[in-house]
Image (cartoon, rainbow, N blue to C red):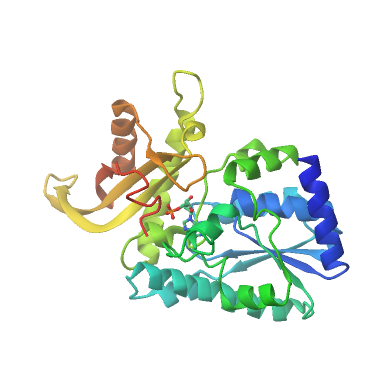
Amino acid sequence: MNQFIEEQSHAIKSLVGECPVLLLISGGVDSTVAGVLLLKILNSDQVHLMYMDTGLMRKNETAVVRSILEKLGGKNVHTIMCEDEFLSALKGITEPEEKRKIIGNMFITIQEREIIRLGLPESYFLAQGSIRADFIESGQDAAKKNVIKSHHNVASPLVDAKRKAGKIIEPLASLYKDDVRRLGRFLGIDEAIVGRHPFPGPGLAVRIPGEVTKEKCDILREADAIYIEELKNRRTASGKTLYDEIWQAFAVLLPIKSVGIADDGGRKYGWVLALRAITSADGMTASVYPFETRDLLEISSRITSSVKEIGRITYDISGKPPATIEWE
Ligand code: XMP
Protein backbone atom coordinates (compact mmCIF):
# COMPACT_ATOMS: atom_id res chain seq x y z
CA MET A 1 0.00 0.00 0.00
CA ASN A 2 2.79 2.40 0.91
CA GLN A 3 4.48 1.69 -2.39
CA PHE A 4 1.21 2.14 -4.33
CA ILE A 5 0.58 5.49 -2.64
CA GLU A 6 4.16 6.62 -3.23
CA GLU A 7 3.98 5.70 -6.92
CA GLN A 8 0.65 7.45 -7.37
CA SER A 9 1.88 10.46 -5.47
CA HIS A 10 4.92 10.81 -7.67
CA ALA A 11 2.95 10.28 -10.91
CA ILE A 12 0.06 12.60 -10.01
CA LYS A 13 2.19 15.40 -8.56
CA SER A 14 4.48 15.53 -11.56
CA LEU A 15 1.48 15.43 -13.93
CA VAL A 16 -0.75 18.09 -12.40
CA GLY A 17 1.74 20.49 -10.83
CA GLU A 18 -0.28 23.42 -9.48
CA CYS A 19 -3.33 22.87 -11.72
CA PRO A 20 -6.74 22.38 -10.15
CA VAL A 21 -8.13 18.85 -10.04
CA LEU A 22 -11.85 18.18 -10.19
CA LEU A 23 -13.02 14.85 -8.77
CA LEU A 24 -16.56 13.65 -9.32
CA ILE A 25 -17.87 12.06 -6.14
CA SER A 26 -20.73 9.57 -6.24
CA GLY A 27 -20.70 8.74 -2.55
CA GLY A 28 -19.59 5.22 -3.37
CA VAL A 29 -16.46 3.54 -2.08
CA ASP A 30 -14.35 4.15 -5.20
CA SER A 31 -14.74 7.90 -5.57
CA THR A 32 -14.44 8.36 -1.80
CA VAL A 33 -11.14 6.48 -1.70
CA ALA A 34 -9.95 8.40 -4.79
CA GLY A 35 -10.87 11.64 -2.97
CA VAL A 36 -8.95 10.77 0.18
CA LEU A 37 -5.96 9.73 -1.90
CA LEU A 38 -5.96 13.01 -3.85
CA LEU A 39 -6.33 15.06 -0.68
CA LYS A 40 -3.39 13.15 0.81
CA ILE A 41 -1.19 13.64 -2.25
CA LEU A 42 -2.13 17.17 -3.34
CA ASN A 43 -2.74 20.53 -1.72
CA SER A 44 -6.38 20.50 -0.56
CA ASP A 45 -6.93 24.00 -2.06
CA GLN A 46 -6.26 22.53 -5.47
CA VAL A 47 -8.75 19.64 -5.13
CA HIS A 48 -12.40 20.26 -6.06
CA LEU A 49 -14.96 17.62 -5.09
CA MET A 50 -18.22 17.67 -7.05
CA TYR A 51 -21.31 15.69 -6.11
CA MET A 52 -24.61 15.72 -8.00
CA ASP A 53 -27.92 14.75 -6.44
CA THR A 54 -29.58 13.35 -9.55
CA GLY A 55 -32.81 12.35 -7.81
CA LEU A 56 -31.74 8.78 -8.58
CA MET A 57 -29.96 8.39 -5.26
CA ARG A 58 -30.73 6.11 -2.34
CA LYS A 59 -32.63 7.34 0.73
CA ASN A 60 -30.68 10.03 2.65
CA GLU A 61 -27.76 9.63 0.22
CA THR A 62 -27.06 13.34 -0.14
CA ALA A 63 -26.90 13.88 3.63
CA VAL A 64 -24.60 10.86 3.99
CA VAL A 65 -22.33 12.02 1.14
CA ARG A 66 -22.15 15.54 2.57
CA SER A 67 -20.98 14.20 5.91
CA ILE A 68 -18.47 11.91 4.17
CA LEU A 69 -17.08 14.88 2.21
CA GLU A 70 -16.76 16.94 5.38
CA LYS A 71 -14.87 14.10 7.02
CA LEU A 72 -12.65 13.88 3.94
CA GLY A 73 -11.35 17.32 4.78
CA GLY A 74 -12.22 18.68 1.34
CA LYS A 75 -12.07 22.48 1.17
CA ASN A 76 -13.80 22.93 -2.19
CA VAL A 77 -16.93 20.80 -2.01
CA HIS A 78 -19.63 21.45 -4.59
CA THR A 79 -23.04 19.80 -4.12
CA ILE A 80 -25.36 20.23 -7.08
CA MET A 81 -29.08 19.52 -6.79
CA CYS A 82 -30.32 18.47 -10.22
CA GLU A 83 -33.18 16.00 -9.73
CA ASP A 84 -35.60 17.88 -12.03
CA GLU A 85 -33.15 17.94 -14.91
CA PHE A 86 -32.45 14.21 -14.72
CA LEU A 87 -36.07 13.17 -14.30
CA SER A 88 -37.31 15.40 -17.14
CA ALA A 89 -34.64 14.01 -19.46
CA LEU A 90 -35.73 10.46 -18.59
CA LYS A 91 -39.46 11.09 -19.09
CA GLY A 92 -40.97 8.48 -21.43
CA ILE A 93 -37.65 6.62 -21.94
CA THR A 94 -37.73 2.86 -21.41
CA GLU A 95 -34.78 1.38 -23.32
CA PRO A 96 -31.91 0.53 -20.88
CA GLU A 97 -28.97 1.76 -22.97
CA GLU A 98 -30.86 4.91 -23.94
CA LYS A 99 -31.49 5.62 -20.25
CA ARG A 100 -27.78 5.14 -19.52
CA LYS A 101 -26.75 7.43 -22.40
CA ILE A 102 -29.18 10.16 -21.31
CA ILE A 103 -27.92 9.99 -17.74
CA GLY A 104 -24.28 9.97 -18.86
CA ASN A 105 -24.85 12.98 -21.11
CA MET A 106 -26.74 14.84 -18.40
CA PHE A 107 -23.82 14.33 -16.00
CA ILE A 108 -21.52 15.84 -18.61
CA THR A 109 -23.83 18.77 -19.45
CA ILE A 110 -24.24 19.71 -15.80
CA GLN A 111 -20.59 19.11 -15.05
CA GLU A 112 -19.50 21.40 -17.92
CA ARG A 113 -21.92 24.09 -16.81
CA GLU A 114 -20.68 23.87 -13.21
CA ILE A 115 -17.04 23.97 -14.27
CA ILE A 116 -17.72 27.27 -16.05
CA ARG A 117 -19.67 28.55 -13.04
CA LEU A 118 -16.77 27.64 -10.74
CA GLY A 119 -14.39 29.44 -13.08
CA LEU A 120 -11.94 26.52 -13.32
CA PRO A 121 -9.22 27.24 -15.89
CA GLU A 122 -8.99 25.19 -19.14
CA SER A 123 -5.92 23.50 -17.64
CA TYR A 124 -7.86 21.68 -14.92
CA PHE A 125 -7.47 17.91 -14.56
CA LEU A 126 -10.47 15.61 -14.32
CA ALA A 127 -10.12 12.87 -11.72
CA GLN A 128 -12.36 9.84 -11.46
CA GLY A 129 -12.72 6.88 -9.16
CA SER A 130 -12.99 4.40 -12.06
CA ILE A 131 -11.66 0.96 -11.19
CA ARG A 132 -10.47 -1.97 -13.29
CA ALA A 133 -13.93 -3.56 -13.59
CA ASP A 134 -15.44 -0.35 -15.04
CA PHE A 135 -13.07 -0.53 -18.01
CA ILE A 136 -13.63 -4.21 -18.61
CA GLU A 137 -17.44 -3.98 -18.43
CA SER A 138 -17.45 -0.99 -20.75
CA GLY A 139 -15.59 -2.94 -23.41
CA GLN A 140 -12.39 -0.90 -23.20
CA ASP A 141 -10.37 -3.91 -22.29
CA ALA A 142 -8.50 -5.49 -25.17
CA ALA A 143 -9.76 -8.92 -24.18
CA LYS A 144 -13.39 -7.91 -24.50
CA LYS A 145 -14.91 -6.27 -27.55
CA ASN A 146 -18.60 -6.29 -26.66
CA VAL A 147 -20.04 -3.60 -24.49
CA ILE A 148 -22.50 -5.03 -21.99
CA LYS A 149 -23.32 -1.70 -20.40
CA SER A 150 -21.90 1.70 -21.11
CA HIS A 151 -20.47 3.22 -17.94
CA HIS A 152 -20.54 6.95 -18.55
CA ASN A 153 -17.46 7.55 -16.45
CA VAL A 154 -15.28 5.52 -18.79
CA ALA A 155 -16.24 6.99 -22.16
CA SER A 156 -18.07 10.29 -22.73
CA PRO A 157 -17.20 13.31 -24.89
CA LEU A 158 -15.70 15.23 -21.96
CA VAL A 159 -13.81 12.24 -20.60
CA ASP A 160 -12.56 11.36 -24.11
CA ALA A 161 -11.40 14.94 -24.72
CA LYS A 162 -9.67 15.09 -21.35
CA ARG A 163 -8.11 11.68 -21.99
CA LYS A 164 -6.77 12.85 -25.37
CA ALA A 165 -5.36 15.98 -23.78
CA GLY A 166 -3.67 13.83 -21.10
CA LYS A 167 -5.72 15.58 -18.45
CA ILE A 168 -7.41 12.65 -16.79
CA ILE A 169 -6.39 11.08 -13.50
CA GLU A 170 -7.70 7.66 -12.56
CA PRO A 171 -5.56 6.55 -9.62
CA LEU A 172 -7.63 3.42 -9.00
CA ALA A 173 -7.77 2.20 -12.62
CA SER A 174 -5.53 -0.80 -11.95
CA LEU A 175 -7.40 -1.92 -8.82
CA TYR A 176 -10.32 -4.24 -8.20
CA LYS A 177 -12.95 -3.46 -5.59
CA ASP A 178 -11.30 -5.43 -2.80
CA ASP A 179 -7.99 -3.63 -3.37
CA VAL A 180 -9.82 -0.29 -3.28
CA ARG A 181 -11.35 -1.26 0.07
CA ARG A 182 -7.94 -2.32 1.38
CA LEU A 183 -6.48 1.00 0.25
CA GLY A 184 -9.39 2.86 1.88
CA ARG A 185 -8.77 1.10 5.20
CA PHE A 186 -5.05 1.80 4.91
CA LEU A 187 -5.87 5.49 4.40
CA GLY A 188 -7.95 5.40 7.59
CA ILE A 189 -11.42 5.76 6.07
CA ASP A 190 -14.35 4.68 8.27
CA GLU A 191 -15.34 1.01 7.95
CA ALA A 192 -18.96 2.16 7.41
CA ILE A 193 -17.82 3.92 4.24
CA VAL A 194 -15.25 1.41 3.02
CA GLY A 195 -17.67 -1.47 3.57
CA ARG A 196 -20.56 0.11 1.64
CA HIS A 197 -22.01 -1.96 -1.15
CA PRO A 198 -21.29 -0.72 -4.69
CA PHE A 199 -23.85 1.65 -6.22
CA PRO A 200 -23.98 2.22 -9.99
CA GLY A 201 -23.40 5.64 -11.56
CA PRO A 202 -26.90 5.76 -13.16
CA GLY A 203 -28.36 5.09 -9.72
CA LEU A 204 -31.93 3.94 -9.23
CA ALA A 205 -32.66 4.42 -12.94
CA VAL A 206 -31.15 1.00 -13.64
CA ARG A 207 -33.18 -0.50 -10.79
CA ILE A 208 -36.48 0.72 -12.26
CA PRO A 209 -36.90 -1.18 -15.53
CA GLY A 210 -39.10 0.90 -17.86
CA GLU A 211 -39.89 4.56 -17.34
CA VAL A 212 -38.34 6.29 -14.33
CA THR A 213 -40.59 8.67 -12.38
CA LYS A 214 -40.18 10.48 -9.08
CA GLU A 215 -43.04 8.45 -7.62
CA LYS A 216 -41.28 5.17 -8.51
CA CYS A 217 -37.94 6.45 -7.18
CA ASP A 218 -39.61 7.36 -3.87
CA ILE A 219 -41.24 3.92 -3.53
CA LEU A 220 -37.99 2.16 -4.37
CA ARG A 221 -35.98 4.36 -1.98
CA GLU A 222 -38.28 3.43 0.92
CA ALA A 223 -38.27 -0.31 0.15
CA ASP A 224 -34.52 -0.42 -0.44
CA ALA A 225 -33.78 1.41 2.81
CA ILE A 226 -35.82 -1.14 4.79
CA TYR A 227 -34.09 -4.04 3.02
CA ILE A 228 -30.62 -2.65 3.74
CA GLU A 229 -31.48 -1.79 7.35
CA GLU A 230 -32.67 -5.38 7.88
CA LEU A 231 -29.44 -6.75 6.41
CA LYS A 232 -27.41 -4.57 8.77
CA ASN A 233 -29.44 -5.75 11.78
CA ARG A 234 -29.40 -9.49 11.02
CA ARG A 235 -26.42 -11.74 11.71
CA THR A 236 -25.12 -15.02 10.41
CA ALA A 237 -24.16 -17.88 12.74
CA SER A 238 -20.57 -16.57 12.71
CA GLY A 239 -21.72 -13.19 14.04
CA LYS A 240 -21.16 -11.20 10.85
CA THR A 241 -24.02 -8.98 9.68
CA LEU A 242 -25.81 -10.13 6.55
CA TYR A 243 -24.86 -6.78 5.01
CA ASP A 244 -21.15 -7.52 5.48
CA GLU A 245 -21.56 -11.11 4.33
CA ILE A 246 -23.23 -10.00 1.08
CA TRP A 247 -21.22 -8.24 -1.64
CA GLN A 248 -24.11 -6.22 -3.00
CA ALA A 249 -27.82 -6.08 -2.15
CA PHE A 250 -30.59 -3.83 -3.40
CA ALA A 251 -34.23 -3.73 -4.38
CA VAL A 252 -35.59 -3.40 -7.93
CA LEU A 253 -39.02 -1.94 -8.72
CA LEU A 254 -40.52 -3.95 -11.57
CA PRO A 255 -42.80 -2.33 -14.16
CA ILE A 256 -45.63 -4.66 -13.15
CA LYS A 257 -48.65 -4.31 -10.91
CA SER A 258 -50.29 -7.43 -9.54
CA VAL A 259 -53.51 -8.15 -7.68
CA GLY A 260 -53.53 -8.09 -3.91
CA ILE A 261 -55.82 -7.56 -0.95
CA ALA A 262 -56.41 -4.05 0.38
CA ASP A 263 -56.76 -3.22 4.10
CA ASP A 264 -60.58 -3.13 3.72
CA GLY A 265 -60.56 -6.63 2.20
CA GLY A 266 -61.13 -5.38 -1.34
CA ARG A 267 -58.88 -5.76 -4.37
CA LYS A 268 -55.81 -3.58 -4.92
CA TYR A 269 -53.08 -3.43 -7.53
CA GLY A 270 -49.60 -3.18 -6.07
CA TRP A 271 -46.15 -2.88 -7.60
CA VAL A 272 -43.92 -5.96 -7.70
CA LEU A 273 -40.51 -5.58 -6.06
CA ALA A 274 -37.53 -7.86 -6.62
CA LEU A 275 -34.83 -8.26 -3.98
CA ARG A 276 -31.29 -8.92 -5.16
CA ALA A 277 -28.35 -10.10 -3.03
CA ILE A 278 -25.15 -11.53 -4.43
CA THR A 279 -21.72 -12.64 -3.34
CA SER A 280 -18.79 -11.79 -5.57
CA ALA A 281 -15.09 -11.03 -5.51
CA ASP A 282 -15.06 -8.19 -7.99
CA GLY A 283 -18.51 -7.82 -9.58
CA MET A 284 -17.34 -9.57 -12.75
CA THR A 285 -19.15 -12.77 -11.80
CA ALA A 286 -21.64 -13.22 -9.00
CA SER A 287 -23.55 -15.89 -7.10
CA VAL A 288 -26.95 -15.53 -5.55
CA TYR A 289 -26.79 -15.17 -1.76
CA PRO A 290 -28.45 -18.23 -0.17
CA PHE A 291 -30.61 -16.52 2.46
CA GLU A 292 -32.21 -18.47 5.28
CA THR A 293 -35.87 -18.62 4.21
CA ARG A 294 -36.95 -17.01 7.48
CA ASP A 295 -34.86 -13.90 6.78
CA LEU A 296 -36.41 -13.46 3.35
CA LEU A 297 -39.95 -13.95 4.64
CA GLU A 298 -39.53 -11.50 7.51
CA ILE A 299 -37.82 -8.86 5.39
CA SER A 300 -40.47 -9.14 2.66
CA SER A 301 -43.28 -8.91 5.14
CA ARG A 302 -41.77 -5.78 6.73
CA ILE A 303 -41.46 -4.13 3.31
CA THR A 304 -45.03 -4.88 2.18
CA SER A 305 -46.48 -3.74 5.50
CA SER A 306 -44.45 -0.48 5.46
CA VAL A 307 -44.58 0.46 1.77
CA LYS A 308 -48.25 0.22 0.83
CA GLU A 309 -47.66 0.71 -2.90
CA ILE A 310 -45.81 -2.63 -3.03
CA GLY A 311 -48.07 -5.65 -3.24
CA ARG A 312 -45.71 -8.51 -3.94
CA ILE A 313 -42.04 -9.39 -3.54
CA THR A 314 -39.84 -11.85 -5.41
CA TYR A 315 -36.22 -12.90 -4.84
CA ASP A 316 -33.91 -12.78 -7.86
CA ILE A 317 -32.21 -16.19 -8.09
CA SER A 318 -30.05 -15.64 -11.18
CA GLY A 319 -26.29 -15.49 -10.97
CA LYS A 320 -23.90 -13.55 -13.22
CA PRO A 321 -23.68 -14.92 -15.85
CA PRO A 322 -26.24 -15.31 -17.32
CA ALA A 323 -27.79 -12.26 -15.61
CA THR A 324 -25.91 -9.08 -14.77
CA ILE A 325 -25.96 -7.77 -11.21
CA GLU A 326 -28.10 -4.71 -11.99
CA TRP A 327 -31.27 -5.30 -13.96
CA GLU A 328 -30.36 -2.80 -16.68
P1 XMP B 1 -23.44 -5.42 -13.71
O1 XMP B 1 -24.86 -5.02 -13.57
O2 XMP B 1 -22.84 -4.92 -14.99
O3 XMP B 1 -22.69 -4.67 -12.56
O4 XMP B 1 -23.23 -6.90 -13.52
C1 XMP B 1 -21.38 -4.93 -12.11
C2 XMP B 1 -21.07 -3.95 -11.01
O5 XMP B 1 -20.95 -2.63 -11.56
C3 XMP B 1 -21.93 -1.77 -11.03
N1 XMP B 1 -22.39 -0.93 -12.13
C4 XMP B 1 -21.94 0.30 -12.36
N2 XMP B 1 -21.03 1.05 -11.72
N3 XMP B 1 -21.36 2.80 -13.29
C5 XMP B 1 -20.76 2.30 -12.18
O6 XMP B 1 -19.97 3.02 -11.58
C6 XMP B 1 -22.29 2.11 -14.00
O7 XMP B 1 -22.82 2.59 -14.98
C7 XMP B 1 -22.59 0.79 -13.51
N4 XMP B 1 -23.43 -0.18 -13.95
C8 XMP B 1 -23.29 -1.24 -13.09
C9 XMP B 1 -23.00 -2.67 -10.44
O8 XMP B 1 -23.74 -2.04 -9.40
C10 XMP B 1 -22.17 -3.85 -9.97
O9 XMP B 1 -21.56 -3.58 -8.73
Q: How many marks?
A: 0
Q: Quick one: quadrant of the C terminus?
A: bottom left
Q: Is residue 175 above or below residue 128?
A: above
Question: Is residue 297 left or right of 286 when viewed as pictured?
Answer: left
Q: Residue furthest left?
A: 266
The quarter of the displayed image where residue 209 is located: bottom left
Image location (x, y in percent) of residue 143: 50, 58
In-front residue for pair 1/240: 1
Q: Nearer the viewer, residue 172 or 216?
A: 172
Seen at 32% across and 50% down, the residue is 322
Where residue 93 appears, as percent x and y from the top left, is 34, 74
Check the image and name the residue furthest to the top.
237
Residue furthest to the front in view is: 143
296 or 147, nearer to the observer: 147
The picture places residue 282, in percent across and down from the top left corner, at 52, 44
Comparing 87 with 97, the one in front is: 97
Q: Is residue 178 left or right of residue 232?
A: right
User: Residue 316 appears in which quarter of the rendering?
Assistant: top left
Q: Residue at x 16, y 48 (%)?
A: 260
In the rendered image, the quadrant that contains the N terminus is top right
Q: Residue at 43% of width from left, 63% of height from top? A: 149
Look at the picture and state if 171 lies above or below 119. above
Residue at x-position 54% and y-position 57%: 134
